[in-house]
Image (cartoon, rainbow, N blue to C red):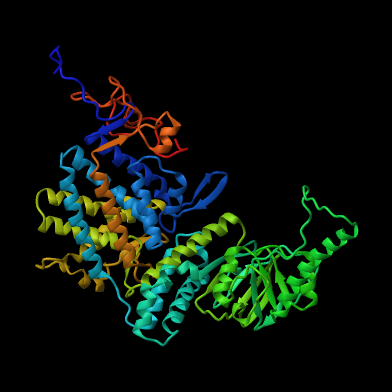
Amino acid sequence: MNQFGTRPGIILLREGTDSSQGKPQLISNMNACQAVADTIRTTLGPCGLDKLVVSGGRTTISNDGATILQLLEIAHPAAKSLVDISRSQDAVVGDGTTSVVLLAAEILKWCKPLVEESNLHPRLIIKYLRAASKYSLECLERVAIRPTTPEDERKVLLQCASTALNSKLIASHLDLFGPMVVDAVLNLQRNVVSKDGDNETNKEAFANDDYLNQMRKWIGIHKVPGGDVRQSFFLEDGVAFSKTFSYAGFEQMTKYFEKPKILLLKVELELKAEKENAEVRIDNPSDYTDIVQAEWDVIYEKLDLCIASGVNIVLSELPIGDLGTQYFCDAGLFCAGRVPSEDLTRIAMATGAVLQTTCRGLTADVLGTCEVFEEVSLGEERLNLMRKCPNPLVSTIVLRGGSEQFIAESERSLHDALMVVRRLLLSTPQVVAGAGSIEALVSAQMKRWALTKAAGKEQLIMEAYAKALEVIPRQLCHNAGLDATLVMAQLRQAHASTTGICNEKEVCELGDAAASNNCWMGIDTNRDGICDAYEAGIWEPLQNKINSWMAATEAACLILSIDETIISPRSQDPALQQTGQLPAMGGGGGMMGLGSDPMGSAMDAVNAQQGGSRSGNLGNGVSYMKGRG
């Protein structure tokens, strides 16, 4: 204490630091997550709508939750966790990126009254949320369906791929893209497992090695703008690349070869114009002719070395000029310059060719081959195809579309379907019915379990989790324009008939309900009611639901565990920003003094509601997304 008998202030944070804590801050984080979920809520399901996002002058049309959230640039620090779980779902499973965000936000929505009105401690809510999540996953595993024959396994893969594509732009072409996706992944599995014989070692290598983990490396999607989407096709054991810029003599080239030798170069095969500042000093004017002739000799030497190696096809990442094009044409070769490096990489993987940076020392072991090389016309576009390449792991899906936005969204849709099939093949394929049926089934079961087995505060939280699961079928109703109140009442009534499966067991045997007609009742968006989703062929991978529910629960627990947000101001000194050092703090301008309230700034603006500070609600005109509101 000083001479005046007062206690000096203790400075903890430097001036300008913003802090908000307590229950209002927790409610504010919940509201932020609700705002994020509301932006993609209408994209769920086969009747979901698309979002048009303009970012950096680039227009994107998509209904993929992970893509939209990534483009929106969420600014709220707590709400970014929903973006993270959406991207994680996309990377691990491929589908369900919207569902995981909606479920996490809905869990927080039903936990909000428990925090505000019932004054339950967040740590207690987290404890029982995890218990509810564990029980829901046990229910999932008991009710999952497993195929018993190879024919059933292919049917499961096809139905799951079709379900993943059913909510995309290409949903009207399921008969084309569904089998295409399954064939692409099964082709990869078949060639990996059978390369040294059909044995368990190779099956384990297929599941654990890089073959499926780097699936996009082996299964390429080549986009050819223009034409009809029905012109898309699957090129098994082959690669494709579009016709590049060509010079005179290209049209006279041979465009069809059987078992050709392929040379890949990163060498420029053209005469370059002299630079403006080039200077050549000569003593005799005749020496200039020798210099020009030397340049011609260099290019001719490169061309002759390529031809002498016995190749039929020359592809280069750098330009091949008009001289080289005509020279190769006269020799009966095919050449293409300015081939994208991505295409050259895939060609090297498929044909066994090795990319060369010089034309000297070309031996047979650096040349690739394939059974057939040909150029085909797709409308006004021309495509070069290499069929039946030595490496059967490499395959290509050629995708057509009328616009760049459509074809880009189609590529994202195919990626999701490929990831779904991939995930099924990583382990024993197990599926559950979709259309909100599994959420309604587990929700009804959890409500009964909470009433009979749980007590006190645990019962409240279990019921909140059960109500949160209903967000999927309810949102499917809203997006389809149905009366959600009426349809959800029918759905609950249908699942209420499975009460006999509990009996006196500690854990309800949901597997007994698989034979029940009402077990898989879900939302029917076509007939404005409910239907048997299993009989309708609406199947989803079990791993999809497991990963989605676990991620949503953990995200909700993470938000609930935050009781204070501290935002440090940016330093005014650019040099300190680069070094990461903090400027010296002044004596009286400190942030938090002992016994004083934290100063309000940006966080107060976010938490304000009609003039009230830190109420936990969004203020008028305040948005958590950059460029919105």
- Residue 250, percent from left and from top: 77, 69
- Split into 4 quadrants, where in the image is the N terminus? top left
The answer to whether one can see residue 476 in this image is no
Q: How many marks?
A: 0
- Residue 364, percent from left and from top: 62, 81
- 515 lies left or right of 239: left
Among all residues in the image, which is located at the extreme front? 283
- 587 lies left or right of 98: left
- 72 lies left or right of 248: left
Q: Residue 264's quadrant in the figure?
A: bottom right
Q: Is residue 16 above or below residue 146?
A: above
Residue drawn 12% across and 48% down? 457
Q: Nearer the viewer, residue 29 or 5?
A: 5
- Residue 439, percent from left and from top: 28, 59
- Split into 4 quadrants, where in the image is the C terminus? top left
Among all residues in the image, which is located at the extreme right? 285
Q: Nearer the viewer, residue 232 or 384?
A: 384
Among all residues in the image, which is located at the extreme top? 4
Residue drawn 41% across and 43% down? 74
Q: Is residue 552 above or below residue 247?
A: above
Q: Nearer the viewer, residue 75 or 595?
A: 595
- Residue 116, percent from left and from top: 20, 37
Q: Nearer the viewer, residue 151 or 560?
A: 560
Q: Residue 365's quadrant in the figure?
A: bottom right
Residue drawn 80% across and 76% down? 330
The answer to whether one can see residue 328 in this image is yes
Q: Is residue 300 above or below residue 629?
A: below
